[in-house]
Amino acid sequence: GSLELMAVPRKKVSPHKKGIRNGPKALKPVPVIIRCTVCGRVKLPHFYCCSGIKRNPS
Protein backbone atom coordinates (compact mmCIF):
# COMPACT_ATOMS: atom_id res chain seq x y z
CA GLY A 1 0.00 0.00 0.00
CA SER A 2 0.91 3.65 -0.09
CA LEU A 3 2.70 5.08 2.92
CA GLU A 4 2.04 8.74 3.63
CA LEU A 5 4.72 10.58 5.57
CA MET A 6 3.56 13.61 7.54
CA ALA A 7 5.60 16.29 9.28
CA VAL A 8 5.47 15.72 13.03
CA PRO A 9 7.37 17.33 15.92
CA ARG A 10 10.44 15.43 17.09
CA LYS A 11 9.99 16.34 20.76
CA LYS A 12 7.23 17.67 22.99
CA VAL A 13 7.33 21.45 23.39
CA SER A 14 7.79 22.41 27.04
CA PRO A 15 5.45 24.96 28.68
CA HIS A 16 8.37 27.39 29.01
CA LYS A 17 9.18 27.30 25.29
CA LYS A 18 5.48 27.56 24.44
CA GLY A 19 5.19 30.63 26.69
CA ILE A 20 8.21 32.28 25.07
CA ARG A 21 6.76 31.67 21.60
CA ASN A 22 3.26 32.93 22.49
CA GLY A 23 4.41 35.87 24.63
CA PRO A 24 4.09 38.57 21.93
CA LYS A 25 0.56 37.33 21.12
CA ALA A 26 -0.72 38.23 24.61
CA LEU A 27 -3.41 40.89 25.04
CA LYS A 28 -2.06 44.40 25.47
CA PRO A 29 -3.56 46.81 28.03
CA VAL A 30 -6.08 49.26 26.57
CA PRO A 31 -4.83 52.87 26.66
CA VAL A 32 -6.73 55.23 28.96
CA ILE A 33 -8.97 57.68 27.11
CA ILE A 34 -9.62 61.08 28.72
CA ARG A 35 -11.50 64.24 27.76
CA CYS A 36 -9.74 67.48 26.85
CA THR A 37 -10.26 70.11 29.55
CA VAL A 38 -10.54 72.90 26.95
CA CYS A 39 -12.76 71.54 24.17
CA GLY A 40 -14.09 68.30 25.69
CA ARG A 41 -12.96 66.05 22.83
CA VAL A 42 -11.70 62.56 23.56
CA LYS A 43 -7.90 62.16 23.52
CA LEU A 44 -5.09 59.98 24.82
CA PRO A 45 -3.16 61.20 27.86
CA HIS A 46 0.08 63.13 27.18
CA PHE A 47 -1.18 64.13 23.71
CA TYR A 48 -2.03 67.71 22.74
CA CYS A 49 -5.59 68.23 21.57
CA CYS A 50 -6.09 72.00 21.52
CA SER A 51 -2.47 73.09 21.25
CA GLY A 52 -3.39 76.19 19.22
CA ILE A 53 -6.22 77.29 21.53
CA LYS A 54 -5.27 79.19 24.67
CA ARG A 55 -7.13 78.42 27.88
CA ASN A 56 -9.50 81.11 29.22
CA PRO A 57 -7.83 82.81 32.25
CA SER A 58 -11.20 83.60 33.87
Image (spheres, helix red, strand yellow):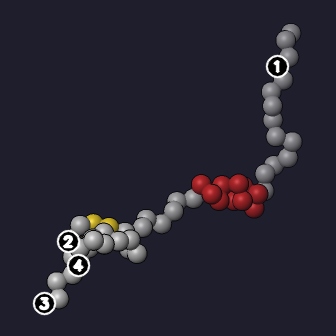
Q: CA distance from mark 4 to mark 2?
A: 11 Å
Give whichever of discs 4 and 2 has the lower sequence position: 2
Front-lying residue, 33 or 10 = 33
Which numbered circle lies on residue 54?
Answer: 4
Disc number lying in front (2 or 3): 3
* Residue 22 percent location from the top left of the image: 66, 55
- Residue bearing mark 1: 4
Secondary element at image label 2 = loop
Question: Which kind of residue does numbered mark 3 sit on?
Answer: Ser
Question: Which kind of residue does numbered mark 1 sit on?
Answer: Glu
Disc number lying in front (4 or 2): 4
Quadrant (top left, top right, bottom left, bottom right) of the N terminus: top right
* Residue 33 percent location from the top left of the image: 34, 69
Question: Which kind of residue does numbered mark 4 sit on?
Answer: Lys
Q: CA distance from mark 1 to mark 2?
A: 68 Å
Q: CA distance from mark 4 to mark 3?
A: 12 Å
Q: CA distance from mark 2 to mark 3?
A: 16 Å
Which numbered circle lies on residue 58?
Answer: 3
Give whichever of discs 2 and 3 has the lower sequence position: 2
